[in-house]
Image (cartoon, rainbow, N blue to C red):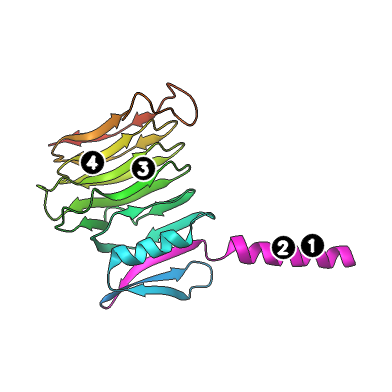
């Protein structure tokens, strides 16, 4: 009996720590963006600036991981969104549009550095000013990450930029148009930098269309 009670207490604590608060739904309501806990449905965060709200949610997923689902609509951002380990950002298809504002202070819409198991999928990334040196997604020295079914258009620099010895990562089913420098750019940024998983590990690009 005592053993059963201990198991129930452990499962309750485990669920509270790791089973709740790790998945969010983000949408616009009125003049603000809100983040709902996917399990409880409660509104946990609210802000008028989409990039501030999304980054706060990403910070909540630091060290535990989880999924963020962006519902259909436009998400204007003025700050680069930094993605931690084991996080999936998923849109509702091309109707979820992340728009980089007119600013030279932002390098890309999404950025992840030295992480693993990061996924960005099923959304659109565009820019209000194609002349700015923006990229859609920058992954630096990441491992086992995925960009899937993303449409990127009007970047002044790169649509997707893998740099710093990314390894065992994949770009699949993406459509990229009108990039100022390159639709997809794979770059080892330093001869002195070593991959976390060894040298010459492959990345995979499949079923992508790049034009304009």
Q: CA distance from mark 1 to mark 2?
A: 6 Å
* Label 1, residues with CA under 10 Å away: few <14, some 14-19, many ≥20: few
Q: Which mark is on residue 11?
A: 2
Residue on which disc 4 sits: 159
Q: Secondary structure at mark 3?
A: strand
Q: Earlier in the sequence, mark 4 or mark 2?
A: 2
Q: Secondary structure at mark 1?
A: helix
Q: CA distance from mark 1 to mark 4?
A: 49 Å
Asked whether the residues under the numbered discs 1 and 2 touch, taking CB atoms below 8 Å apart as contact, a structural biologist would say: yes
Of badges 3 and 1, the one in the foreground is 1
Give the x, y percent position of residue 46. 36, 74
Residue on which disc 3 sits: 148
Q: Earlier in the sequence, mark 3 or mark 4?
A: 3
Give the x, y percent position of residue 57. 42, 63
Q: Which mark is on residue 125?
A: none
Q: Is residue 88 magenta?
A: no
Q: Residue furthest bottom?
A: 30
Q: CA distance from mark 3 to mark 2?
A: 34 Å
Q: Secondary structure at mark 4?
A: strand
Asked whether the residues under the numbered discs 4 and 2 touch, taking CB atoms below 8 Å apart as contact, a structural biologist would say: no
Q: CA distance from mark 3 to mark 4?
A: 13 Å
Picture layout, residue 37 above or below residue 85: below
Report which quarter residue 178 is drawn in.
Answer: top left
Q: Earlier in the sequence, mark 1 or mark 4?
A: 1
Residue on which disc 1 sits: 7
Of badges 3 and 2, the one in the foreground is 2
Magenta highlight range: 1-30
Picture layout, residue 104 above or below residue 205: below
Residue pictured at 37% horizontal, 66% vertical? 26
Give the x, y percent position of residue 153. 18, 46
51 horizontally vs 181: left or right:
right
Report which quarter residue 180 is drawn in.
Answer: top left
């Amino acid at each position: 009996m005592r053993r059963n009670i201990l198991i129930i207490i452990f499962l309750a604590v485990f669920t509270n720590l790791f089973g709740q608060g790790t998945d969010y739904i983000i949408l616009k309501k009125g003049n603000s963006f809100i983040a709902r806990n996917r399990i409880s449905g409660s509104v946990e965060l609210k802000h008028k600036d989409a990039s501030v709200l999304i980054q706060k949610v990403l910070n909540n997923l630091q060290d535990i991981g989880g999924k963020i689902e962006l519902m259909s609509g436009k998400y204007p951002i003025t700050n680069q969104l930094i993605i931690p380990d084991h996080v999936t950002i998923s849109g509702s298809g091309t109707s979820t549009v992340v728009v980089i504002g007119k600013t030279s202070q932002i390098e890309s819409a999404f950025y992840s550095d030295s992480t693993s198991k990061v996924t960005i999928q099923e959304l659109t990334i565009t820019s209000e000013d194609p002349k700015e040196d923006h990229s859609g997604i920058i992954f630096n020295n990441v491992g086992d990450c995925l960009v899937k079914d993303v449409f990127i258009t009007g970047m002044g620099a790169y649509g997707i930029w893998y740099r710093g010895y990314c390894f065992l990562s994949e770009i699949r089913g993406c459509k990229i148009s009108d990039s100022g420098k390159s639709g997809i750019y794979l770059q080892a940024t330093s001869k002195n930098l070593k991959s976390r998983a060894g040298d010459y590990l492959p990345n995979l690009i499949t079923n992508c269309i790049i034009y304009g």
